Image (spheres, rainbow, N blue to C red):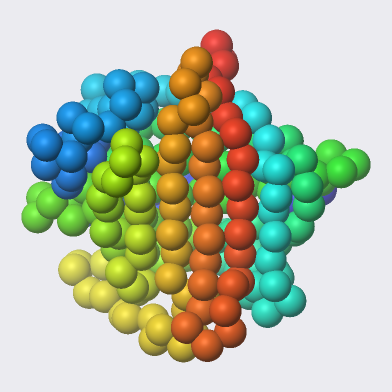
Amino acid sequence: MTDIQALPRELIDARTSAGTRHGLRDVLGNEAWNRLPEAVRERFAATAGNATYAGAFEIVRASLLGRVFAWLGTMFGTPVVPRCGENVAARVLVRPHAGGVDWNREYTFAAGDMHLVRSTKVVTDEGELIERLSARLCMPLAVHEAGGVLHFVSRDYYFDLGSGLRLPLPRFFSPGVTRVEHVDLGHGWFRFTLAVTHPVFGEMFFQTGRFCATEET
């Protein structure tokens, strides 16, 4: 079983110091924000508090190269789950803290094999949405609304060296373009779908699952 330990608080603080606001309204703009279902606005609002969502991923898929990439990533804090499966029980833990909001995905595979993928969404003072992953890897995101669905698309990747310094990750050596959809299903449920596609090697990762808020916070 993978050992799940909290990141040092000083590292979390360093990774989120570039952003000071929660919520996506400023990123999307009022018109697009108001087109989102009310439940989605509540999940991504600046005033949103702790939340835990439970459900399952019907599909957790990765190519051979994707699995190699994921297992190598475990040395740096598991930026993507290094397993594949179907009907994988999972929880999404949302924990706001100064500078950003943690959206952590906890997967439980067969025989209790558990993996935790940590990420923090930060809205900078310049209005840029950045997802901060393990090992100081950062992923600036374009975000838009279409048909009431919230879409996130990666722009590129870089390592945050601190003091405003960035080390870009060449696209060829990155996992590829990450696309995430957050679809409200009504009655408290939503669908999370993630697809990562490399410009040369094609699909690296694909996951989709349904989740609903629990009383646990």
Q: In which quarter of the image is residue 102?
A: top left
Q: In which quarter of the image is residue 211?
A: top right
**Residue, x 57% and y 42% (percent of image)?**
105
Q: In this view, does 55 lie above or below 82?
A: above
Q: Position of residue 46 (x, y in %)?
A: 22, 29
Tell me: 110 left or right of 14.
Answer: right
Q: Where is residue 179 in the image (x, y as percent from the top left)?
A: 43, 59
Can you name the residue that lies furthest to the top here? Answer: 215
**Residue, x 47% and y 83% (percent of image)?**
199
Can you name the residue that lies furthest to the front here? Answer: 147
Tell me: 49 left or right of 189.
Answer: left
**Residue, x 68% and y 35% (percent of image)?**
56
In the image, 144 versus 2, the foreground residue is 144
In the image, 70 versus 56, the foreground residue is 56
Q: Quadrant of residue 203?
A: bottom right
In the image, 36 versus 73, the foreground residue is 36
Q: Is residue 40 above or below residue 178?
A: above
Q: Is residue 27 above or below residue 213?
A: below
Q: Can residue 78 be seen in this view?
A: no
**Residue, x 41% and y 84% (percent of image)?**
171
In the image, 13 versus 202, the foreground residue is 202
Q: Where is residue 108 in the image (x, y as percent from the top left)?
A: 75, 40
Q: Where is residue 177 in the image (x, y as percent from the top left)?
A: 43, 71
Q: In this view, does 35 lie above or below 65?
A: above
Count up the numbered dots: 0
Q: Can residue 167 be seen in this view?
A: yes
Tell me: 83 left or right of 24.
Answer: right
